Each structure stands twice: as C-alpha cells, then as structure tokens.
Image (cartoon, grey):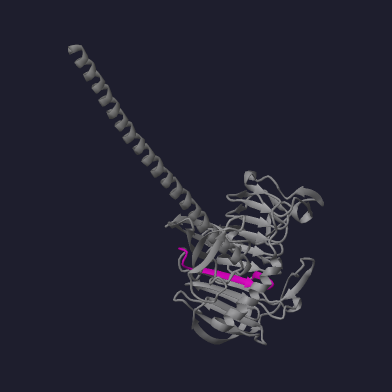
Amino acid sequence: MRYALRVTRAKGNIMMTVLISTSVLAVIGISLISVVMSQTKIFKLKKVKIYAIHIAEAGANYYKWHLAHSPEDYQDGTGGPGPYEHNYYDAYGKLIGQFSLNIVPPPTGTTVVEITSKGYSNISANATRKIQIKYGKPSLTQYSFLTNSDIWLGPEENASGPFHANGGIRMDGTNNAEMTSAKETYICTSGHGCDNEEKPGIWGTGPNFNLWKFPVSAVDFNLISMDLATIKNDAYVNGHYYPKSNKKGYHIIFYNNGSYTIYEVTKLQSAIWQLNDDWTKLTKEAEQIDNETEIGTYGMPSNGLIFVEDNLWVEGEINGRITVASARFPDVPSKNTSIIINNNINYVSRNGDHILGLIAQKNVKVPKHAPTDLQIDGFLLAQKGRVFRNYYSPRSIKNSIVVYGGIITNKIWTWSWVSGSGAVVDGYRTTNSIYDNDTKYSPPPGFPTSGEYDSISWKEQ
C-alpha cells in the first residue's frame, strides 16, 4: 500500500511539473511572438519613414530641376501660393506616396531659395518626414577675378580668392584659393614673356600649384548682355534709369547717407595720348570732366538698380546695396559705353551690408588723373572690354591701388605697365586685391549669375 501510494504521488508530481513547464513555455512563446511582431512593426515603420524621407528629398530635387528650367518661378508654375502637392511613383509606375512643397523666394540681395518638402508614404498615414533645403545660384561674384583672356601674375602679385581664366594663366605669384583655367594648353606670347610657346593651362613659378585646376568649363561672357538688358528694364520700371544724354555722359557721386547726386557731363578736358582699344598704337582720347550740370540728388532706388544709357564717371561712399550699369541698346559695338572711376569709392563699412556692382558694356577704366593712392570697393565688370588703367604719353607713375571686391574682365586687365626688366614704367607701383568672400550667393542687385543651383544646407524638421 505504501509503495502504491508513493508511485501515485510521483506521477502526480511529474504531471504537475509538465503542466508548469508547458505554461512557462507558452508564456515565453507568446512573449517572443509579441516581441517579434512588435519588432516587425517597428521595422516596417522605420522602412516606411525611410520611404517618406526619400519622397521628401525627391520633392526638393524636383524643385531644383524646376528652377533650372524656370529660374524666376517660385510658385511651381501655378501663379498662386503653396503648398504644392505632387504624387510620387516608383520606377515601375506604382503610386507610393506624395510630397508637399513650400517655396520661399530669395530675400532681396541674395539668390538663396528655401524649400520645405514634406514626404508622405501610402503605406501608413503616420509615416511623414519633412526636410528644409536651401539652394543658392552662384553669382559671378563667386570669383575674386574672372577673365575671358590669358593672364600673367608676376612674382610680387597675390591672388586672393577664387580665380578663373577662360584663357591660359602664367602664375608666378601666390594664390590662397582655387585657380582654374578653361585651357588644357595655350600659346604664350611675348606679352607674357614667351616666344609663342605652347604651355599648360596654368604654369609658372608660383608655389601654390596644388590649388591649380585645368581644364574646366568656360564662363560665357556673351550671356552678360542679356543681364544688362534685364537690368535696364528693371531699372526703368522700379529703379532709376537715365537715357542717352546727347552730351558726354553722366557723373554720379555717392554719399554716406545713402543718397547720390547725378550730373550731366557737358564738356571734357583736352584729349590726351594713350593706347587705343587694341593696345596697338597711341591715340588721343578725352577722359577728364571739365564742365557738368547737376540733374538732382536722390535716395537709393528700391530695387538697388541704376542704369545709365551712356558713359559714366563714378565715385563716392556706398551706403546700401547697389548696382550701376552702363550700356546702350541696341548693342552696336562702336556705341558701347564705359565706366570711368575718377576718384575713390568706399563702403561705409565692410560688414556685408554694403556692396557695389559696376557693370560696363565696354570698359571699366581708371584714368590718368585718378588719385595716386586709389581705393575701390566693389565688383567691377567689363563685358566686352577690360578693367584697366591705360598706358599714357607722357607716362605717369602712381603709388598704390586697392580693390576690395572682385574684377571681371573680358580682355586683358592691368593696373601697371612694366619694362622688360619688370620695372613699373606707368600706372600703379603697388596693386592689391582683397576678395569680398560674402558675395557668392549675396551679390550686388541684378548681378549676373552662372551655373546651376548649389545645395547650401539640409535639415530635417
């Protein structure tokens, strides 16, 4: 009897143990299944959210493409306010989501467009992601120096900021930023110390050759003519426009209170001997004001544009953001106009709030009578001619010239004329260019741009 009872109890214990073990395993199994299901849901949600951010980025990329084809359209072709909704399809044509865009046009004085794109996935209504991207279109002010010709910088010359030539570059000086040429090779002539020799796109004794890059794409100077026509129209509508004077041109003096006085130049002093436009022979040309008549004193135009359809003399202190353009249309080469910098041009402060663009259809010229120490704050652009100080007879050696901003010149640029031994025989003994590096996406109003939009910033909201 005792034996049978012990056996019965043993069987009962075994059954109880099995039941408890089975229950524990069931609980663990259910928990594991629950964890797996939860992890699967999390994985699917993460996957859906990844889809959503890809869709949001696709929206921003779409609008970058749109701006490349319609640079001034910030309303997605609708003519009305956003947000702008678009369906998004996969590579097989299946609708997988939507994106919604809000576009903020460039603030005055910049080329920076702000795009907020919200991506939705059709898999889950809760799977949305929002990003903000800023795109900026680089202006020609991205260069401290830009030329359509060959260029030679001597041992005492320094290039500050990005430097580009559509021609070849002999670089015997120093540079602190990328220097580029559109030429793989070019023919170096006597003007640059060579005997019609083939040279690399950039060569010379300059020490910073690790910053040299060639060949790269050329910059099309012909496109600047369209920008000049646009500036003329915008100045006529919302800026200040001055027609052909039927005299000698105009003279503008800027003041540090944000105003300027404009004069009509009625008479020039006697013509003086200097090189002609092609630098092939001496010719006589008048360039110094003798008499002028005041037209009036005005505040800066609301859109920052002044257009003069005649030759222009300019000087003074710049308070604000302004572009002054000189051109004559229709574009007849013999009637192209120039800008003459006859005195100092200074910013009230070099803090980024003040900027000047001078755009001439032909030349931007520093004349013989300019100060012996000359300061020019601004970006100087000569579409068809050159930014330069000419060679005169009799010669006149000046002390120094400093340009704070940048130089854009079609033909060969120079402030100094040197002998075969390298001694300055005319122009400025000391030249210094300081690049205003805050202007790539914040150029003077209406200043020409080049290339496609760059991505400046990206963040998720």
Of residues 372 and 152, which is closer to you in this image?
A: 152
Outermost residue, left direction?
2
Queried whether the magenta region covers residue 22, the answer comes back as: no
Q: Which residues are magenta?
A: 351-366
Residue visible at 41% across and 46% down?
42
Of residues 241 and 102, which is closer to you in this image?
A: 102
Outermost residue, front direction?
1
Q: Is residue 399 above or below residue 206?
A: below
Outermost residue, right direction?
196
Image location (x, y in percent) of residue 52 = 48, 55
Describe residue 407's horizontal placement relative to residue 353 as left or right: right
Image location (x, y in percent) of residue 231 = 61, 76
Of residues 381 and 311, which is closer to you in this image?
A: 381
Queried whether the magenta region covers residue 354, the answer comes back as: yes
Whether residue 125 is visible here, answered yes or no, is yes
Image location (x, y in percent) of residue 383 = 68, 69
Q: Is residue 268 above or below residue 275?
A: below
Total label count? 0
Classify the position of the C terminus by image quarter: bottom left
Of residues 432 and 230, which is closer to you in this image?
A: 230
Q: Quadrant of residue 182?
A: bottom right
Whether residue 207 is visible here, answered yes or no, is no
Classify the position of the N terminus by image quarter: top left
Image location (x, y in percent) of residue 102 = 48, 67
Residue visible at 50% across and 60% down?
134
Describe residue 166's horizontal placement relative to residue 313 as left or right: right
